[in-house]
Image (spheres, rainbow, N blue to C red):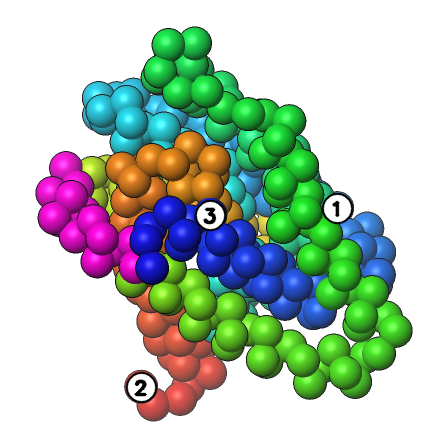
Protein backbone atom coordinates (compact mmCIF):
# COMPACT_ATOMS: atom_id res chain seq x y z
CA UNK A 1 0.00 0.00 0.00
CA UNK A 2 1.36 3.40 -0.97
CA UNK A 3 1.80 6.15 1.58
CA UNK A 4 -0.86 8.12 -0.32
CA UNK A 5 -3.39 5.38 0.37
CA UNK A 6 -2.36 5.29 4.01
CA UNK A 7 -2.78 9.01 4.57
CA UNK A 8 -5.81 9.55 2.35
CA UNK A 9 -7.91 6.48 3.17
CA UNK A 10 -6.66 4.46 6.15
CA UNK A 11 -5.61 7.34 8.42
CA UNK A 12 -8.97 9.20 8.36
CA UNK A 13 -10.73 5.89 8.95
CA UNK A 14 -8.46 5.15 11.91
CA UNK A 15 -9.09 8.58 13.39
CA UNK A 16 -12.84 8.05 12.93
CA UNK A 17 -12.59 4.77 14.88
CA UNK A 18 -10.46 6.36 17.62
CA UNK A 19 -12.94 9.20 18.07
CA UNK A 20 -15.83 6.73 17.98
CA UNK A 21 -14.15 4.87 20.83
CA UNK A 22 -13.90 8.12 22.78
CA UNK A 23 -17.58 8.78 22.14
CA UNK A 24 -18.51 5.31 23.37
CA UNK A 25 -16.84 6.16 26.69
CA UNK A 26 -18.65 9.50 27.10
CA UNK A 27 -22.16 10.41 28.16
CA UNK A 28 -24.21 13.56 28.57
CA UNK A 29 -23.24 13.46 32.25
CA UNK A 30 -19.61 14.08 31.25
CA UNK A 31 -20.66 17.39 29.70
CA UNK A 32 -22.59 18.28 32.83
CA UNK A 33 -19.51 17.40 34.91
CA UNK A 34 -17.72 20.35 33.28
CA UNK A 35 -19.54 22.51 35.82
CA UNK A 36 -18.06 20.66 38.80
CA UNK A 37 -14.50 21.96 38.40
CA UNK A 38 -14.81 24.90 35.96
CA UNK A 39 -11.50 26.53 36.91
CA UNK A 40 -9.50 23.36 36.26
CA UNK A 41 -11.30 22.77 32.95
CA UNK A 42 -10.70 26.38 31.89
CA UNK A 43 -7.00 26.31 32.80
CA UNK A 44 -6.47 22.93 31.13
CA UNK A 45 -8.30 23.92 27.96
CA UNK A 46 -6.40 27.20 27.70
CA UNK A 47 -3.10 25.35 28.09
CA UNK A 48 -4.11 22.91 25.36
CA UNK A 49 -5.55 25.37 22.86
CA UNK A 50 -3.42 28.48 23.54
CA UNK A 51 -0.56 27.73 25.94
CA UNK A 52 1.12 24.87 24.09
CA UNK A 53 1.00 26.58 20.66
CA UNK A 54 2.62 29.66 22.20
CA UNK A 55 5.29 27.49 23.82
CA UNK A 56 5.81 25.66 20.54
CA UNK A 57 6.21 28.95 18.69
CA UNK A 58 8.84 30.11 21.18
CA UNK A 59 10.78 26.85 20.93
CA UNK A 60 10.87 26.62 17.12
CA UNK A 61 11.65 30.34 16.80
CA UNK A 62 14.44 30.44 19.39
CA UNK A 63 16.05 27.26 18.03
CA UNK A 64 15.69 28.33 14.37
CA UNK A 65 13.93 25.15 13.33
CA UNK A 66 13.67 24.81 9.51
CA UNK A 67 10.30 26.15 8.27
CA UNK A 68 8.77 22.86 7.11
CA UNK A 69 9.66 21.19 10.41
CA UNK A 70 8.43 24.21 12.33
CA UNK A 71 5.01 23.92 10.66
CA UNK A 72 4.87 20.19 11.48
CA UNK A 73 5.66 20.90 15.14
CA UNK A 74 3.11 23.70 15.31
CA UNK A 75 0.37 21.53 13.78
CA UNK A 76 1.15 18.96 16.47
CA UNK A 77 0.72 21.62 19.16
CA UNK A 78 -2.73 22.43 17.73
CA UNK A 79 -3.89 18.81 18.26
CA UNK A 80 -4.87 18.20 21.91
CA UNK A 81 -4.54 14.69 23.26
CA UNK A 82 -7.50 12.34 23.50
CA UNK A 83 -7.58 8.68 24.45
CA UNK A 84 -3.81 8.49 25.01
CA UNK A 85 -3.74 11.32 27.53
CA UNK A 86 -6.80 9.84 29.28
CA UNK A 87 -4.96 6.54 29.68
CA UNK A 88 -1.75 8.18 30.93
CA UNK A 89 -3.74 10.26 33.44
CA UNK A 90 -5.27 7.04 34.71
CA UNK A 91 -1.89 5.30 34.97
CA UNK A 92 -0.44 8.32 36.81
CA UNK A 93 -3.30 8.26 39.33
CA UNK A 94 -4.15 11.80 38.25
CA UNK A 95 -7.62 13.32 37.91
CA UNK A 96 -9.07 11.07 35.20
CA UNK A 97 -12.45 12.81 35.32
CA UNK A 98 -10.74 16.12 34.52
CA UNK A 99 -8.85 14.45 31.69
CA UNK A 100 -12.13 13.22 30.20
CA UNK A 101 -13.64 16.69 30.60
CA UNK A 102 -10.74 18.24 28.71
CA UNK A 103 -11.21 15.62 25.98
CA UNK A 104 -14.86 16.68 25.73
CA UNK A 105 -13.88 20.34 25.27
CA UNK A 106 -11.10 19.50 22.80
CA UNK A 107 -13.43 17.31 20.73
CA UNK A 108 -15.74 20.29 20.25
CA UNK A 109 -13.12 22.99 19.65
CA UNK A 110 -10.39 21.20 17.67
CA UNK A 111 -12.29 20.72 14.37
CA UNK A 112 -12.44 24.53 14.20
CA UNK A 113 -9.21 25.65 15.87
CA UNK A 114 -6.87 23.11 14.23
CA UNK A 115 -7.55 24.14 10.59
CA UNK A 116 -7.51 27.86 11.41
CA UNK A 117 -4.28 27.71 13.41
CA UNK A 118 -2.68 25.41 10.81
CA UNK A 119 -3.52 27.95 8.10
CA UNK A 120 -1.77 30.66 10.12
CA UNK A 121 1.30 28.43 10.67
CA UNK A 122 1.61 27.62 6.97
CA UNK A 123 1.10 31.27 6.10
CA UNK A 124 3.76 32.37 8.60
CA UNK A 125 6.51 29.90 7.73
CA UNK A 126 5.82 28.73 4.17
CA UNK A 127 4.28 31.75 2.41
CA UNK A 128 0.91 30.24 1.60
CA UNK A 129 0.36 32.26 -1.58
CA UNK A 130 3.50 30.93 -3.28
CA UNK A 131 4.21 27.50 -1.78
CA UNK A 132 1.44 25.51 -0.13
CA UNK A 133 -2.28 26.20 -0.08
CA UNK A 134 -4.30 25.25 2.96
CA UNK A 135 -8.03 24.61 2.36
CA UNK A 136 -9.47 25.89 5.63
CA UNK A 137 -13.19 25.33 5.00
CA UNK A 138 -12.71 21.87 3.48
CA UNK A 139 -10.47 20.86 6.37
CA UNK A 140 -12.98 22.08 8.96
CA UNK A 141 -15.71 20.03 7.26
CA UNK A 142 -13.39 17.02 7.07
CA UNK A 143 -12.52 17.19 10.76
CA UNK A 144 -16.17 17.63 11.70
CA UNK A 145 -16.90 14.37 9.85
CA UNK A 146 -13.96 12.30 11.10
CA UNK A 147 -13.36 13.86 14.54
CA UNK A 148 -16.60 15.30 15.96
CA UNK A 149 -19.29 13.21 14.24
CA UNK A 150 -17.92 9.86 15.53
CA UNK A 151 -17.82 11.24 19.09
CA UNK A 152 -21.50 12.19 18.83
CA UNK A 153 -22.28 8.85 17.21
CA UNK A 154 -20.51 6.97 20.00
CA UNK A 155 -22.37 8.94 22.65
CA UNK A 156 -25.67 8.23 20.89
CA UNK A 157 -24.92 4.49 20.79
CA UNK A 158 -24.04 4.53 24.49
CA UNK A 159 -27.23 6.44 25.30
CA UNK A 160 -29.41 4.02 23.31
CA UNK A 161 -27.61 0.77 24.17
CA UNK A 162 -25.18 1.12 27.08
CA UNK A 163 -24.42 -2.62 27.31
CA UNK A 164 -23.71 -2.85 23.60
CA UNK A 165 -21.44 0.21 23.82
CA UNK A 166 -19.47 -1.40 26.67
CA UNK A 167 -18.97 -4.56 24.60
CA UNK A 168 -18.12 -2.64 21.44
CA UNK A 169 -15.59 -0.30 23.05
CA UNK A 170 -12.69 -2.82 23.43
CA UNK A 171 -13.01 -3.91 19.79
CA UNK A 172 -12.97 -0.30 18.60
CA UNK A 173 -10.05 0.53 20.90
CA UNK A 174 -7.78 -2.34 19.89
CA UNK A 175 -8.90 -2.30 16.25
CA UNK A 176 -8.06 1.39 15.86
CA UNK A 177 -4.73 0.82 17.66
CA UNK A 178 -3.87 -1.97 15.22
CA UNK A 179 -4.74 0.14 12.19
CA UNK A 180 -2.85 3.14 13.55
CA UNK A 181 0.20 0.93 14.07
CA UNK A 182 -0.14 -0.18 10.44
CA UNK A 183 -0.26 3.43 9.26
CA UNK A 184 2.79 4.38 11.34
CA UNK A 185 4.80 1.38 10.14
CA UNK A 186 3.83 2.13 6.54
CA UNK A 187 4.96 5.75 6.77
CA UNK A 188 8.16 4.80 8.60
CA UNK A 189 9.10 2.08 6.10
CA UNK A 190 8.42 4.38 3.17
CA UNK A 191 10.50 7.22 4.65
CA UNK A 192 13.00 5.50 6.95
CA UNK A 193 16.10 7.28 5.65
CA UNK A 194 14.47 10.69 5.87
CA UNK A 195 13.10 9.94 9.35
CA UNK A 196 16.55 8.83 10.54
CA UNK A 197 18.04 12.13 9.38
CA UNK A 198 15.17 14.03 10.97
CA UNK A 199 15.79 12.33 14.30
CA UNK A 200 19.16 14.03 14.64
CA UNK A 201 17.84 17.35 13.31
CA UNK A 202 14.59 17.83 15.22
CA UNK A 203 14.53 14.95 17.71
CA UNK A 204 16.08 17.05 20.52
CA UNK A 205 13.70 19.93 19.73
CA UNK A 206 10.67 17.65 19.87
CA UNK A 207 11.79 16.04 23.13
CA UNK A 208 12.53 19.45 24.64
CA UNK A 209 9.07 20.72 23.68
CA UNK A 210 7.37 17.66 25.16
CA UNK A 211 9.18 18.01 28.50
CA UNK A 212 8.72 21.79 28.58
CA UNK A 213 5.00 21.41 27.83
CA UNK A 214 4.46 19.08 30.78
CA UNK A 215 6.42 21.34 33.11
CA UNK A 216 4.54 24.41 31.89
CA UNK A 217 1.20 22.66 32.40
CA UNK A 218 2.20 21.75 35.95
CA UNK A 219 3.50 25.21 36.87
CA UNK A 220 0.48 27.04 35.46
CA UNK A 221 -1.92 24.71 37.23
CA UNK A 222 -0.05 25.18 40.49
CA UNK A 223 -0.11 28.93 39.92
CA UNK A 224 -3.91 28.72 39.81
CA UNK A 225 -3.79 26.74 43.08
CA UNK A 226 -5.24 23.58 41.62
CA UNK A 227 -4.82 20.29 43.45
CA UNK A 228 -1.87 17.98 42.84
CA UNK A 229 -4.00 15.54 40.87
CA UNK A 230 -5.51 18.31 38.76
CA UNK A 231 -2.06 19.77 38.13
CA UNK A 232 -0.73 16.39 37.00
CA UNK A 233 -3.65 15.97 34.63
CA UNK A 234 -3.10 19.39 33.08
CA UNK A 235 0.62 18.64 32.74
CA UNK A 236 -0.19 15.44 30.88
CA UNK A 237 -2.88 17.03 28.72
CA UNK A 238 -0.47 19.83 27.75
CA UNK A 239 2.40 17.53 26.80
CA UNK A 240 0.59 14.54 25.28
CA UNK A 241 -0.80 15.38 21.85
CA UNK A 242 -3.06 13.62 19.35
CA UNK A 243 -0.51 12.56 16.74
CA UNK A 244 -3.19 10.82 14.67
CA UNK A 245 -5.15 14.03 14.32
CA UNK A 246 -2.01 15.97 13.38
CA UNK A 247 -1.13 13.30 10.78
CA UNK A 248 -4.49 13.89 9.10
CA UNK A 249 -3.47 17.52 8.53
CA UNK A 250 0.14 16.90 7.50
CA UNK A 251 -0.59 13.77 5.45
CA UNK A 252 -4.16 13.96 4.16
CA UNK A 253 -4.42 17.75 3.73
CA UNK A 254 -0.88 19.04 3.13
CA UNK A 255 0.59 15.78 1.70
CA UNK A 256 3.95 16.58 3.29
CA UNK A 257 6.03 13.64 4.49
CA UNK A 258 8.52 15.86 6.32
CA UNK A 259 5.78 17.34 8.49
CA UNK A 260 4.33 13.88 9.05
CA UNK A 261 7.78 12.69 10.09
CA UNK A 262 7.98 15.40 12.75
CA UNK A 263 4.55 14.37 14.04
CA UNK A 264 5.64 10.73 14.22
CA UNK A 265 8.79 11.68 16.11
CA UNK A 266 6.76 13.63 18.65
CA UNK A 267 4.26 10.78 18.95
CA UNK A 268 7.13 8.47 19.93
CA UNK A 269 9.33 10.80 21.96
CA UNK A 270 6.48 12.26 24.02
CA UNK A 271 6.13 8.80 25.56
CA UNK A 272 9.53 9.21 27.28
CA UNK A 273 8.57 11.98 29.75
CA UNK A 274 5.14 10.36 30.07
CA UNK A 275 6.73 7.04 31.08
CA UNK A 276 9.04 8.80 33.55
CA UNK A 277 6.00 10.60 34.97
CA UNK A 278 4.17 7.29 35.45
CA UNK A 279 7.20 5.69 37.12
CA UNK A 280 7.67 8.67 39.44
CA UNK A 281 4.00 8.72 40.40
CA UNK A 282 3.95 5.02 41.26
CA UNK A 283 7.21 5.36 43.20
CA UNK A 284 5.97 8.36 45.20
CA UNK A 285 2.57 6.72 45.77
CA UNK A 286 4.21 3.58 47.16
CA UNK A 287 6.39 5.66 49.44
CA UNK A 288 3.37 7.63 50.66
CA UNK A 289 1.38 4.47 51.37
CA UNK A 290 4.32 2.69 53.01
CA UNK A 291 4.46 -0.13 50.44
CA UNK A 292 7.70 -1.78 49.49
CA UNK A 293 9.09 -0.68 46.13
Real-space Cα separation, disc 1 to disc 2, in angstroms: 36 Å
Q: Nearer the viewer, mark 1 or mark 2?
A: 1
**Compared with residue 30, is residue 261 higher up or lower down, i.e. above or below?**
above
Q: Earlier in the sequence, mark 1 or mark 2?
A: 1
Return the residue at label 3.
Answer: 8
**Compared with residue 186, is residue 234 higher up or lower down, i.e. above or below?**
above
Q: Look at the image and give the residue range highlighted in magenta.
A: 186-201
Quarter of the rendering containing residue 290:
bottom left
Return the residue at label 1.
Answer: 38
Q: Residue at x 53, y 52 (%)?
A: 12
Return the residue at label 2.
Answer: 293
Q: Nearer the viewer, mark 2 or mark 3?
A: 3
In the rendering, at what x and y percent does residue 80 appear?
53, 46
Q: Is residue 112 visible?
A: yes
In the rendering, at what x and y percent does residue 104 appear?
69, 52
Which quadrant of the figure contains the N terminus? bottom left
In the rendering, at what x and y percent does residue 293 appear?
31, 86
Amino acid sequence: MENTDLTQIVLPLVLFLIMLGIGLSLSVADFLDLRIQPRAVFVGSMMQIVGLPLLGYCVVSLLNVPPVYAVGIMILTFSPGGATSNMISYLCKADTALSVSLTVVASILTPITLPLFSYLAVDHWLLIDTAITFPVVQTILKLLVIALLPVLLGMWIRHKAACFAEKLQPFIKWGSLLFMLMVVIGIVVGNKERLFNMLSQVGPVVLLLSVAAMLAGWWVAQGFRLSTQQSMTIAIETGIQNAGLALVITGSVLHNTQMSGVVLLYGVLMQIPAALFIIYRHWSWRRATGLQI
